[in-house]
Amino acid sequence: MDNLVLEKIKDLLANNETIGIGVGKSPDVDEMAAALSLYLALTQTGKKVTVASPTEPLVEIASLVGIDKVKKNFDGGASGDLTVSFPYKEGEIEKISYTLEGGKLNILVKAGENGLNFNEKDVEYKKSAGAPGLIFVVGTPRLSDLGSVFDPEALKDSKIINIDYKSDNQGFGDIPLLGRSSSSVSELVTSFLVSLDLKIDVDIASNLLSGIISATDNFQNPQTSPLSFEMAANLMKKGAVRQMARKEQDSIEEDSFFTPKPQPRTPSFSKTSIGTEEKKPEIKFPTDVDENNPPDDWLAPKIYKGSTSI
């Protein structure tokens, strides 16, 4: 990232308190890990941040920190509150009510004894929690992939930063940050946070490391970029907890070399005929004893004596 682009991003962050982070439909571990990490990092700076996806998170990304913060749309925009303001003096308004007529809401301001001291041009309309002034679109090749999250009319004045590495990304947005030679969007977000000198705590580091591991098949993919190793090392220095990627776990479970399956023991049976009692082993006595006429004291207890010479 060159210095000019970096300065533009810093200005956008400084001038916007409300920020949106969008990911496309059914995001994978890498995409959601990058989005949530960006959300956590910007939230720490005091910004009001919303991360949104048009679909429910998949089971495989349920362990990522912050997954419970994902919404279906950005705070504000079409869902913001509308405030109607006008000048007011004590006693000039008797009551305020409303009616519904023809699908329209009519707010009725009933004048008091002194009448109203304002007219239509003095009425102001304000929308609270307006549309995010800055939106990060993470790991999403097309704006249309955001589905209901992106309302072109409501977000027409928002600035967009597009972070992705996929070859089919359309390059949309005011600032496209496209790492074509990268192998994950998590490594790009890691580099982005480092460039902006934003804090990377253990939760953020663990999320990003999980994203990199998942996207690179635990660094076994031949297309794994040098940046992946560099950023992974950086994240581990930050205290990232390495979680085994699902693909790696599945591979180990399927590989008999790592998990040898015990072979069932085959029971052995003696060869006996049906209905024939199995022959018991013959008990042999010492050869110097007559088996038919043993001595009278044969079964009596024996006492053995010995002598010790000193």
Image (cartoon, helix red, strand yellow):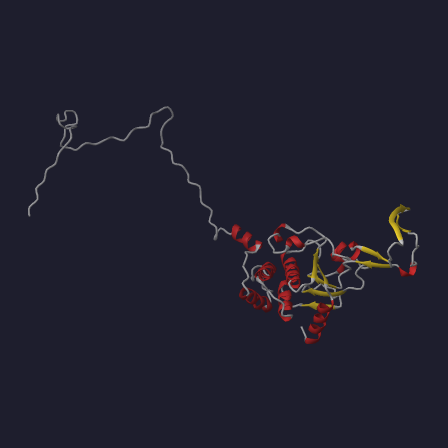
Where is residue 279 shown, x and y percent of the image?
A: 30, 28
Q: Residue furthest left?
A: 310
Pick the residue in front: 241 or 302. Answer: 241
Pick the residue in front: 46 or 273. Answer: 46
Pick the residue in front: 11 or 146. Answer: 11
> Quadrant location of residue 301?
top left
Vertical position of residue 303 compared to residue 236: above or below:
above
Where is residue 290 shown, x and y percent of the image?
A: 14, 28
Q: Who's the residue at 65% across and 59% down the image?
A: 36
Instruction: From the viewer's perspective, tell me whether residue 49 is left or right of residue 103.
Output: left
Q: Who's the residue at 27% across and 31% down the image?
A: 281
Pick the residue in front: 278 or 90. Answer: 90
Q: Who's the residue at 64% across and 65% down the image?
A: 189
Q: Who's the residue at 52% across and 50% down the image?
A: 253
Q: Quadrant of the N terminus?
A: bottom right
Q: How many marks?
A: 0
Where is residue 27 shown, x and y percent of the image?
A: 67, 55
Q: Residue furthest bottom?
A: 3
> Quadrant location of residue 10?
bottom right
Where is residue 191 shown, x and y percent of the image?
A: 62, 68
Instruction: From the viewer's perspective, tell me whether residue 238 is left or right of residue 4.
Output: left
